[in-house]
Each structure stands twice: as structure tokens, then as C-alpha cells.
Amino acid sequence: MSTTDQAERPPAPGTRSDHRGPAAGSAPPPGPPGGVRWAYAMVIVATLAAIASNVFEIADQIETGVAGAATTGDLVLTIAFCALFGFFAEMLRAGRQWGRVLLTVFTSLGIVFTGLGLAGLGGRPLVGALQGSLAVISLVTSVVGLVLLFLPSVNRWMSAVRRQSRTVPQRLRKIVLTAHVAISVGWLGLVTGMFAMSVSGATTGSAEQQAAMYRTMSMLDEIFLGMTSMFALITGIVVGAGTKWGLLQRRWVAVKFFLTMGVMILGFGVIHQLILRANELVDAGAPVRGGELDTVGWSMAGSAALAVVSLVFMTAVSTYKPWGPTRWGKKARPGAAASRTDR
């Protein structure tokens, strides 16, 4: 989702990217309306409730003696989410459009995953009534905050301050772009490795080898896969939405954004669940061939193959940058729609 296709233009005087500061006599941007302040509060409450729920889950794992590498990964993700959501909320209050985009994306993902957890359709089961109550609080406040983010008064305010506060500084953009490329390469490598292991597990006749493959996949899934996909999405959105070119102004950027979301949902909603089921069957001593393990194994292989193809396609799209601007891009840059030098 990076926008490396664009040559940087000199910043217009009076914009924030101009280090000389705002033009003399220019009016300061208006302060955030009540909708922004309430959305900020709702997001913070939802984040704190989700973090508390994760802490209770980690504590339960420690008490029951099942804590391990996955618990460490959960703790790291909890700390990362706390810091990131606080940062995104502050960027929203500062009028950064990309801050609102990131809050919208991750709040929406949180709503989906929390809803799946409450319905017992995905993720880990909720431990006790307290964790369930925290999940409900997080879900409700997330929905309210998401609605508040797009009130008419908030949209008008974001439009008023957008030109002054939209872009990420050039130095920060390069740092984030470097991180995005490195993390995306790691994500592709992880998914490719999991595809190879799923095929090995689905075709082997050895129970020991099959168990080793599926347990290794479980470790990679619990510790690394969710983290790399999340940070690939975050850095991609910052590089895309945090520049004057926008997240949805170039078709190739928009395609990468939605495909990244799709691969994340595929990983959590399908591959993760299949890995859990495969390990349950292995632990229960299910037959290596001719039973449910065959179905689960080949389903994992097919899902991982789809993820690999999607990530390779996104890499190709980043290289060739096809298709030109979207209708929003044409509105933002009239007369430049047909110019391939913009791509």
C-alpha cells in the first residue's frame, strides 16, 4: 500500500510539510468538534476494555500452567495495541486524516473479531463472565466511536484541517516505508513457509512428522503471523493515507489495501482456526490418512496458497503500479488522470 510511485513535489508555502511554518496571516485551524472528542473517548474506553480482557486471558493461562510462547506473543501485541491506539487517537485529535483512517480500520477489525469471539465462532474462548463483560463493553464503545468518527461535523472539521495536517513528514515517511517493505517481505516468507508445512503435513504418512509440521505452524501463527500482518497493514496505511496522494486515490494502492485486509481476515478467520483444529486432532490421536485430518490439512494448504498468491500479486502491483487514479484521485488532481508520469 505504499505510494512510492509518486515523485515528491516541493511543499506549498504555508503547509505543515513546509518547515518554514504557516504563511504569515494564515488563520489557525479550528479546534476539534465535540464529535471528535467523544470519538476519542470511546476509542480509549474500547481499547482499555480490550486490553483488560487480554490481561485476564494471559493471567488465566499463567494460572492454569498453559502459558508459553503464545502468551508472550499475546503480551507483546497487547502492549503494541495500547501504544498504537493511543497514538492513532492523538493523531485524530490533531486532525490527521490518516489517523482517522487507521482508527477506522482497526476499530472495525476489533468489532469483527470481538463479535466472533462473543459468538464463539473464532479466536480463543472468553474466560469467565468478567472477560465476556469487558468484550461487550469494548464492542459497544467501538461501534459508538466508529459512528462518531464520521458525523457531519467531524467530516467538515477534517476537511477544514486536511490541507494543513494530512501528510506525514518526509523523513518519517521513509522510515515507515522501509519498515513496511521489510515487514511485508517477512509476512510473505512466513505464509510461504506455512504453505510448505501444510502441504507436508497433508501428504506425509508419518504421524510424528505431521505433528511436528502442525505444531510448528501453530507456533508461527501464535507468535509471528498476526503481528507481521498487523504491522504490514499499519505501516502501509501510514505511507498511503499519510501522504498527499491518499489511500484511495490510486487504484493499485486501494487494491493493496483491501487485499491486505482480506488476507488478514483469511489468516485469522480460516487458517488460524484450521491450525487449531489440526492440532486438536493430532493430540487426540486421529489417523494420519483417511480421516478429518486429510480434510483439515488440505484446507490449510489451499488457504495458505491463496494467501501466498494474494501477497505475490500485491508485490507485482507495487512494482508495476497499474490502473491509474480512482474517481477520488481525479477529483483531487484534475487534469492529471491520464498522466502515466504520476504513476
Image (cartoon, rainbow, N blue to C red):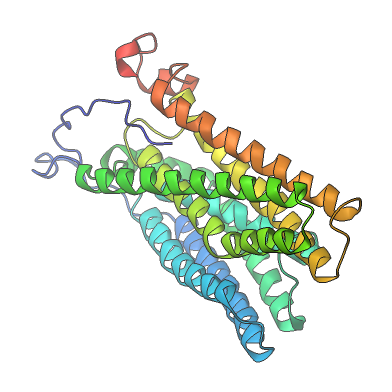
Front-most of residues 256 and 107: 256
Front-most of residues 74 and 82: 74
Q: Position of residue 270 (x, y in %)?
A: 73, 50
Q: Quadrant of residue 64?
A: bottom right
In screen coordinates, is 141 left or right of 47?
A: right
Residue at 61% of width from left, 53% of height from top?
Answer: 109
Up-down: is 134 above or below 288? below
Q: Position of residue 291 (x, y in %)?
A: 91, 53
Q: Position of residue 79 (x, y in %)?
A: 46, 72
Q: Quadrant of the C terminus?
A: top left
Q: Residue furthest front?
A: 206
Front-most of residues 146 and 113: 113
Residue at 8% of width from left, 43% of height from top?
Answer: 20
Residue at 63% of width from left, 68% of height from top?
Answer: 138
Up-down: is 314 above or below 268? above
Q: In the rendered image, is residue 200 in sight? A: yes
Q: Residue furthest right?
A: 290
Q: In the rendered image, is residue 153 in sight? A: no
Q: Quadrant of the N terminus?
A: top left
Residue at 65% of width from left, 43% of height from top?
Answer: 304
In screen coordinates, is 13 left or right of 181?
A: left
